[in-house]
Image (cartoon, rainbow, N blue to C red):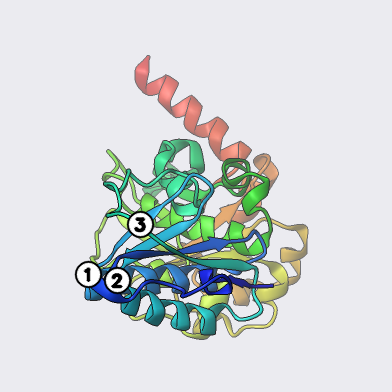
């Protein structure tokens, strides 16, 4: 529940003569939805940018707007409308003297926490094994995706829960788009639809969740998280995407050879292939890209052979 605290309980909220600056504090609680958090922070930043104020963050995750009373009152009303009934606190306070220089924002909010950590520690990498002409095995790229367990550990109990984990996942995905080009193959980078890169790159393929198929983007993309249950409901030739990451599952045997031909096995990356039987199953259906323990073993053997 939002709590609104005003110095007006003991007198005027902010002294008007001379327009002495005051401060508006926004303290998000752990139950506040990420969308409301982003909107509230954007309102504070807009007030600072357009009405001559300053915004900073405190050690406890509080965002603080310092500005003249009219700007504070406008920001307070806008935030109250957005946060009504939600898990956050707004506090206005008067300043008796000009505020000191604002310190650098402390890494206490979810975005700051995840931006301050080394990117590699927040990612999961899955090597992709491919088969070229003549059935010659070769490295065929890498799938890179935010690690849910690493993000949850980084955010800690203050920012736990599915909404904040999804928000952190998007923050890490956005950072992953800045990865450099690989020495070989293509990086398949998992991102939510709202984090699609503005510029295309031949070495980078954004991989969207299967839910994005309801409104596919116009750019080149891959699809992740496809399961037997989802595939059984679609017309294979109508599934968009230049790469389809499909989890290996015995239930896939129920799909006919005609289904795989319609889907286009050359687009498929069969995920979670644990042994040679899974590899042979995929090859028999025309699939030529794999990831999982068996793919890792073959790629390790290829590297040793190339080094020896």
Image coordinates for residue 123, horizontal then vertical, percent: 49, 43
Judged by depth in the image, the label closer to the viewer, 1 or 2, is 2
Q: Which residue is mark 3?
A: 96
Q: Residues within 10 Å of mark 3 (few under 14, many from 20)?
A: few
- Residue 224, labelled with which disc? none
Label 1 Cα crowd, 10 Å radius (few <14 / some 14-19 / many 20+)? few
Q: Which label sits on residue 68? A: 2
Query: Residue 52 bears which disc, if any?
Result: 1
Q: Are marks 1 and 2 in contact (CB under 8 Å)?
A: yes
Q: Earlier in the sequence, mark 1 or mark 3?
A: 1
Circle 2: element type: loop
Q: In this image, 99 relative to 148: left or right?
A: left
Mark closest to the chain's N terminus, 1 or 2? 1
Outermost residue on the top side: it is 308
Q: Position of residue 183 (x, y in %)?
A: 27, 38
Above or below, comparing residue 292 to residue 10 in the picture:
above
Residue 276 in the image: x percent, y percent?
65, 40
């Amino acid at each position: 529940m939002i709590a609104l605290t005003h110095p007006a309980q003991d007198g005027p909220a902010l002294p008007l003569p001379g327009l002495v600056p005051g401060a508006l504090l926004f303290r998000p609680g752990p139950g506040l939805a990420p969308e409301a958090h982003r909107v509230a922070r954007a309102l504070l930043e807009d007030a600072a940018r357009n009405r001559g104020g300053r915004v900073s963050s405190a050690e406890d995750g509080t965002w603080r707007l310092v500005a003249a009373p009219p700007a504070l009152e406008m920001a307070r009303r806008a935030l109250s409308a957005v946060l009504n009934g939600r898990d956050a606190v707004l506090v206005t306070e008067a300043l008796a003297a000009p505020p000191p220089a604002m310190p650098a924002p402390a890494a206490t909010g979810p975005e700051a926490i995840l931006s301050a950590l080394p990117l590699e520690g927040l990612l999961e990498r899955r090597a992709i094994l491919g088969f070229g002409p003549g059935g010659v095995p070769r490295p065929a790229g890498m799938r890179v995706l935010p690690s849910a367990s690493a993000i949850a550990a980084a955010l800690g109990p203050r920012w736990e829960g599915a909404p904040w984990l999804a928000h952190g996942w998007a923050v890490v995905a956005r950072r992953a788009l800045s990865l450099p080009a690989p020495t070989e193959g293509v990086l398949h980078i998992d991102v939510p639809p709202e984090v699609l890169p503005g510029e295309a790159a031949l070495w980078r393929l954004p991989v969207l969740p299967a839910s994005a198929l309801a409104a596919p983007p116009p750019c080149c993309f891959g699809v992740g998280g496809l399961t037997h249950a989802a595939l059984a409901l679609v017309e294979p030739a109508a599934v968009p995407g230049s790469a389809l990451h499909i989890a290996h599952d015995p239930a896939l045997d129920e799909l006919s050879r005609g289904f795989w031909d319609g889907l286009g096995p050359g687009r498929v990356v069969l995920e979670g292939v644990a042994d040679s039987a899974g590899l042979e199953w995929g090859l028999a259906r025309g699939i030529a890209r794999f990831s999982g323990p068996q793919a890792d073993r073959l790629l390790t053997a290829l590297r040793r052979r190339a080094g020896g």
